[in-house]
């Protein structure tokens, strides 16, 4: 008798935890296949530290083959129209453009989320997001390049513009990007002094009345204070009205000259789930409390792409956070195993353990188990939390933190990622694109902006 086939699509927080838990529960009683564009799990919360040069890129990537030995890894992206619920197959495209098809008896959709775009003129052409490793590497090179070009500039206006960095969105990511970025640029200008009177300037914008609007107000006040003390220009109740290659027009009418626009306004569910023809809630696939798709008991969904009922708040759905995705992955695995008669199923119910926001250096804001912390103690708790949560590379991450505390950062460009290879509207931010998007899966090709098209022929040293 053949073993049941379990197919997991996506290896983010939800997908990785589903695969790991299923491997433990089934104990070779099922064939588990994991379809993912990359060969690693990316620990997203530490991405700002990679962009700031605190951590080396590989530190936050955990090998799928190395940590999931009982799971078959298939490199590829599910095609936009590749999921056939009737035939129980998923068609995909591998990294070299070859097509393939995978069958399943149980399907777990954990495809995550992508950058959230708003209808703001010029943003898609002139901003970069912050959802994947390629974007973080591009961001780091770009910031270093702007400081280098500013240090050599004869024109004070050009120098000031290159030293102005605009971050839109004061949620987790935007707040940490601005906090870490200010530390990075301050360190860079100590080695490469700018014109007299010019210093790096980071603007953090959000339409909300405060930073970290989704978190406890006391925690948000702590983060706001640290940012302002560090020199970050925090502007709440403000948004971008238009973006151009030379700067951004703000909603209050001010034009800020800048060569850097980082888009951190949030995420939206991966558009792949829209193609399967099942009910959605704001782009998320509706599931029951057991994470099953109604009408298709063999299909499960979890993480950012799933609208999971919040049993603690009737009528609402759980948030799109790493905490929820991680725990939902564990519950999804248990319920898949239960559908095979291995264990009993369980509804998803969560309890918030608190939140941590790393603000760079020894500063952080945290409220573990509802206890508000700030300063070095919050920093220690935050880093301890990340080390405990990471499924691998803990010693290497801790070593990088130690080295960063005692050694100066290396302010050099790697030149591995250009702006046109990380388009803001990509459906796969975990992959760098090649010119024209040839390696994008069928039906998921982003339009290439005119600015990025022009940059294909522009050498790295002159890229803005």
Image (spheres, grey):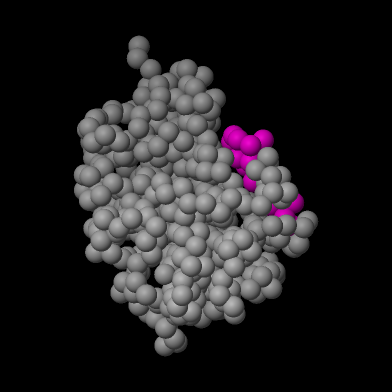
Looking at the rendering, which quadrant does residue 399 occupy?
Answer: top right
Q: Where's residue 238, x and y in %?
A: 48, 80
Q: Quadrant of residue 92?
A: top left
368 or 390: which is nearer to us? 390
| Quarter of the figure that contains the N terminus | top left
Direction from residue 429 to residue 64 in the image, left or right: right
Say which residue appears at 67% left-offset and 35% top-offset: 395
Q: Is residue 383 visible?
A: no
Identify the residue at horizontal 49%, vertical 55% (top origin): 140
Q: Which residues are magenta?
A: 378-397
Q: Is 142 on the left or on the right of 201, as rendered?
A: left
Query: 48 above or below 147?
Result: above
Q: Nearer the viewer, residue 403 or 45?
A: 403
**6 on left or right of 410:** left
Q: Nearer the viewer, residue 77 or 164?
A: 164
Quadrant where the image shows the C terminus: bottom left
Q: Name the residue at 64% across, 64% down.
A: 190
Residue at the farthest top position: 1
Above or below: residue 134 compared with residue 394: below
Q: Residue 125: x, y in percent?
A: 31, 66
Instruction: Give the main secondary structure of the magenta stretch.
Output: helix
Q: Is residue 99 left or right of residue 321?
A: left
């Amino acid at each position: 008798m053949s073993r049941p086939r379990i197919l997991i699509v996506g290896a983010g927080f939800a997908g990785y935890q589903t695969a790991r838990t299923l491997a433990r529960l089934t104990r070779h009683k099922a064939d588990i296949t994991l379809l993912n564009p990359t060969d690693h799990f990316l620990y997203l919360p530490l991405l700002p530290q990679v962009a700031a040069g605190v951590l080396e890129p590989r530190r936050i990537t955990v090998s799928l083959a190395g940590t999931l030995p009982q799971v078959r890894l298939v490199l590829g992206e599910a095609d936009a129209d590749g999921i056939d619920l009737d035939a129980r197959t998923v068609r995909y495209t591998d990294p070299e453009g070859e097509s393939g098809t995978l069958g399943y008896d149980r399907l777990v959709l954990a495809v995550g989320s992508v950058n959230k775009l708003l209808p703001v003129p010029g943003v898609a052409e002139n901003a970069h997001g912050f959802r994947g490793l390629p974007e973080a590497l591009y961001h780091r090179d770009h910031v270093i390049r702007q400081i280098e070009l500013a240090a050599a500039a004869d024109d004070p206006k050009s120098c000031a513009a290159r030293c102005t960095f605009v971050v839109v969105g004061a949620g987790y990511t935007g707040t940490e990007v601005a906090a870490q970025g200010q530390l990075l640029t301050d360190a860079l200008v100590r080695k490469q002094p700018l014109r007299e009177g010019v210093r790096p300037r980071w603007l953090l914008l959000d339409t909300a009345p405060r930073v970290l609007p989704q978190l406890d107000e006391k925690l948000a006040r702590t983060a706001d204070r640290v940012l302002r003390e560090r020199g970050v220009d925090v502007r709440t109740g403000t948004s971008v009205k238009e973006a151009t290659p030379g700067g951004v027009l703000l909603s209050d009418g001010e034009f800020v000259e800048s060569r850097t626009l980082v888009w951190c306004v949030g995420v939206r569910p991966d558009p792949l789930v829209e193609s399967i023809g099942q009910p959605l809630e704001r782009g998320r696939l509706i599931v029951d409390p057991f994470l099953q798709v109604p009408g298709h008991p063999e299909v499960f969904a979890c993480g950012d792409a799933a609208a999971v009922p919040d049993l603690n708040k009737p009528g609402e759905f759980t948030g799109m956070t790493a905490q929820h995705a991680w725990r939902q992955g564990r519950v999804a695995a248990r319920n898949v195993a239960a559908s095979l008669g291995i264990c009993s199923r369980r509804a998803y119910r969560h309890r918030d353990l608190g939140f941590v926001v790393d603000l760079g250096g020894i500063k952080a804001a945290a409220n573990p188990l509802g206890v508000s912390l700030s300063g070095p103690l919050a920093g220690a708790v935050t880093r301890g939390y990340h080390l405990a949560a990471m499924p691998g590379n803990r010693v290497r991450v801790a070593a990088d933190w130690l080295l960063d505390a005692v050694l100066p950062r290396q302010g050099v460009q790697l030149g591995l990622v250009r702006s046109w290879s990380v388009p803001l509207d990509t459906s796969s931010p975990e992959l760098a694109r090649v010119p024209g998007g040839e390696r994008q899966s069928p039906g998921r090709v982003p339009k290439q902006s005119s600015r990025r098209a022009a940059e294909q022929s522009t050498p790295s040293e002159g890229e803005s």
